[in-house]
Image (spheres, rainbow, N blue to C red):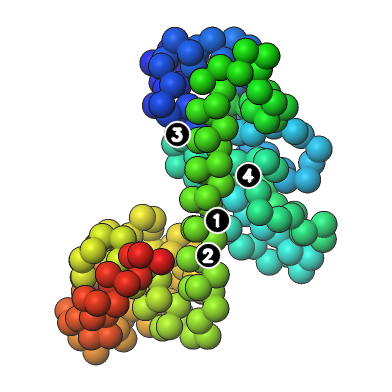
Amino acid sequence: MIEMQEFSKLPLFSGNPETECQRMMECFRAPLKSFRPGETAYTYGGGGETVGILLTGTAAVVKIDAGGGRTVLERLSEGGVFGELIAFASLPCDSVSVVCETACEVLLLPQEKLTSTCGKACDCHRILIENMLSLISRKAFALSERVEVLSCRTIREKLLCCFRIFAAKEHSLSFTLPFSLSALADYICSDRSAMMRELKRLREEGFLEVSGRNVRFLSEHPFEKADLCAASLV
């Protein structure tokens, strides 16, 4: 069972008192489902008009193309939201699913309850819609960052572009990767072994230090402070 105090901590319900969150949940009658690692929690284009919230665990939004190639589009942690309502696009020829990386608990909200205001036009529903728009905006921004990285031609360029973005967010030449090195290879759409070889070259050339998920640039070149500040404003 979900603890009552948890709803107001979710990004989708942020700003609403817990009592109002509980009242909305009673109205939504949203089912809670549990999934094992490797199970599919949601398939885009499957006709399910729901919005999912990841309460526990981690999952990945995975695209399988016609040739069987697998691309991780997004990684979801606790509080992550998914579903057609907040998807950017879904190509008919491709399969896009939410696959659980660990054991997960998912709350499924009926889409019509989120998009239709209640008869009282209450503040709690207004805040809910504002939160949804904010989540869509953040996903669009994350997508633009991913496009910037994938537009680079070589693994080296992709790594440096990716690291510039992460460094800009920290306003520092030192930062912690938000995921593992294996996940980083998925993020830049590269073979992990090839990526590790390029990371080794960057270390040997004195560009950076890497220890686990911790990365530190050893020089401001080619990441001048002005560039970091400019990138953080994009």
Q: Which image quadrant for residue 73? A: bottom right
The residue shown at (31%, 60%) is 169
Q: Which image quadrant for residue 34? A: top right
Q: Which residue does the numbered mark 2 point to in the structure image?
A: 144
**CB-based contact (under 8 Å), mark 4 and mark 1:** no
Instruction: State which tag comes first along the sequence, 3 or 1.
Output: 3
In the figure, 8 relative to 53: above or below? above
The numbered disc on residue 215 is: none
Q: Which residue does the numbered mark 1 point to in the structure image?
A: 140
- Of 80 and 224, the residue lying toward us: 224
* Label 1: which secondary element: helix
- Give, as a three-letter code, the residue at label 1: Ala
Asked if residue 35 lies left or right of residue 200, the reply is right
**CB-based contact (under 8 Å), mark 2 and mark 1:** yes
| Residue 9 visible to the viewer | yes
The numbered disc on residue 11 is: 3
Q: Which residue does the numbered mark 4 point to in the structure image?
A: 86
- Give, as a three-letter code, the residue at label 3: Pro
**CB-based contact (under 8 Å), mark 3 and mark 2:** no
Asked if residue 110 lies left or right of residue 140, the reply is right
Asked if residue 219 lies left or right of residue 113, the reply is left
- Give, as a three-letter code, the residue at label 4: Ile
Q: Residues within 10 Å of mark 3 (few under 14, many from 20)?
A: some
C-alpha gap between disc 2 and disc 4? 15 Å
Instruction: State which tag comes first along the sequence, 3 or 4.
Output: 3
